[in-house]
Image (cartoon, helix red, strand yellow):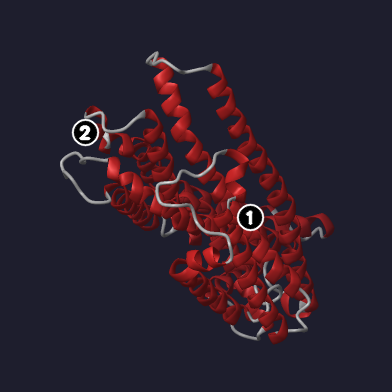
Amino acid sequence: MFHSFFPRPKLFFTSAVVWTAICILVWYGVGPELGAALGMPPLAEGEKPPLGLAFFVTPDNLWFYLYFTIFVVIFGIVWKLIDRDHPWSNWSIWGSAFIIFIAYFVVQISVALNNWRGPFFDLFQRALEKQPGITAGQFYELQLRFLEIGMVSVAMNVIIAFFTSHYVFRWRTAMNDFYLSKWNKLRHIEGASQRIQEDTMRFASIVEGLGVVLINSVMTLVVFLPILFQLSGHVTELPILGAIPHSLFWLALIWSVFGTVLLALVGIKLPGLQFRNQRVEAAFRKELVYGEDYADRARPLTMAELFANVRKNYFRMYWHYTYFNVARYTFGQLDAIILTFMLIPTIVAAKITMGIWQQIATAFGQVSDSFQYLVSSWSTIIELLSIRKRLVAFEAAIDNEPLPEIDQEYLAEQGEVLVRD
């Protein structure tokens, strides 16, 4: 699943995590000083960032782009030297780095929008209060800055959609070529054709999608946590709890961890059920396909038993998804009101303006959503785990190891069905 596309996957991903940690430590340790020495200093304390397109080309942002490129080039060159013969290293190394950079840039777009919301909604509030000096030109100017940010967002979404489509297909191609080269060992596995044709495609697509979301979540935390710390200064107290330093950050952290643990516990059985569902569906479909070519296959008793397995597994899934959905949707409804509920004392005390409220809501939402990565992605993770279980059987057959227990059970059951038939 991984070594067909990535060079030495365990070492590659371990080194990538370590190198990323080093990059982050260096950036927060001496990054701004190095940028200032190179003529790209950060914004002065208290200086507001520019709005619109100008935000993306500020000296400190240009320095980060250069910093990121330097560290990626070092990492990529080292790995090209370590594994020169890997056929997909260009896509797995440079392609992954490009996706990470685009994910960071998308987070920067969110920051630019949050910077814009403050002055726009403060102006909006003053206009509704009929304060003097408010003109239509001020609104048109801010709308133009918003359009600039929106055009950057459109461009990034188009680029990432186009590139990731090619990236995913290359990964699928790598797995497809590898598995087909081992076909003699794999052909006896239940649903082997489906696992190569469909599961490789779905696995590459889901891993890439989850990976982008995970990277985006990490980038969001790195960028928005300092913003949320700063905005917490406007919050005077929380209901029942009273005044807590950096209250918005702790609220986002505790609430998100609670949601993640809750859904992980109630959904713990779903990956295995999803895998079993794919297995019984494949068995039913496979017997039907044999029945098209052989008169002695797909007999009524056999098909009735196979469909009974399909029915049993679906009904079991419906039950487990019922209480999982109760937990998920209940948490979603509470999540929609938690921030407003906690800010009621601050709102009543008139400690924030409409612009600050918009910035708090955006920053809290970004941090909360990032911490809730498992909550928002749990259904997709369940699907991925079930696909992985199917592909693990391929890995076992290739390495001449015993099949996973669930596949051994299936082969035994199939043998019993054929004997009875």
Q: Residue 102 carries which label?
A: 1
| Residue 158 visible, this angle | yes
Looking at the image, which is closer to me, 300 or 185?
Answer: 185
On the rendered image, what quadrant is the N terminus found in?
bottom right
Q: Residue furthest top?
A: 130
Quick check: 250 above or below 413? above
Q: Which residue is drawn at 16% across and 43% down?
A: 242
Q: Which amino acid does label 2 sit on?
A: Pro
Quick check: 231 above or below 79? above
Q: Which residue is drawn at 23% across and 28% down?
A: 348
Q: Is mark 2 on a helix, strand or loop?
A: helix
Q: Do labels 1 and 2 touch, CB within 8 Å?
A: no
Left or right placement of residue 262 versus residue 348 in this view: right
Left or right placement of residue 38 versus residue 286 in this view: left
**Residue 362 image position (x, y, % from top left):** 43, 40
Q: Is mark 1 on a helix, strand or loop?
A: helix
| Residue 1 visible, this angle | no
Mark 1 crowdedness (10 Å alpha carbons): few <14, some 14-19, many ≥20: some
Question: Badge 2 is on which residue?
Answer: 345
Looking at the image, which is closer to me, 248 or 286?
Answer: 248
**Residue 269 image position (x, y, % from top left):** 43, 59
On the rendered image, what quadrant is the C terminus found in?
bottom right
**Which sits earlier in the primary sequence, circle 1 or circle 2?**
1
Looking at the image, which is closer to me, 325 or 378?
Answer: 378
Q: Which residue is drawn at 55% across and 71% down?
A: 409
Q: Residue 41 carries which label?
A: none
**Residue 6 image position (x, y, % from top left):** 67, 75
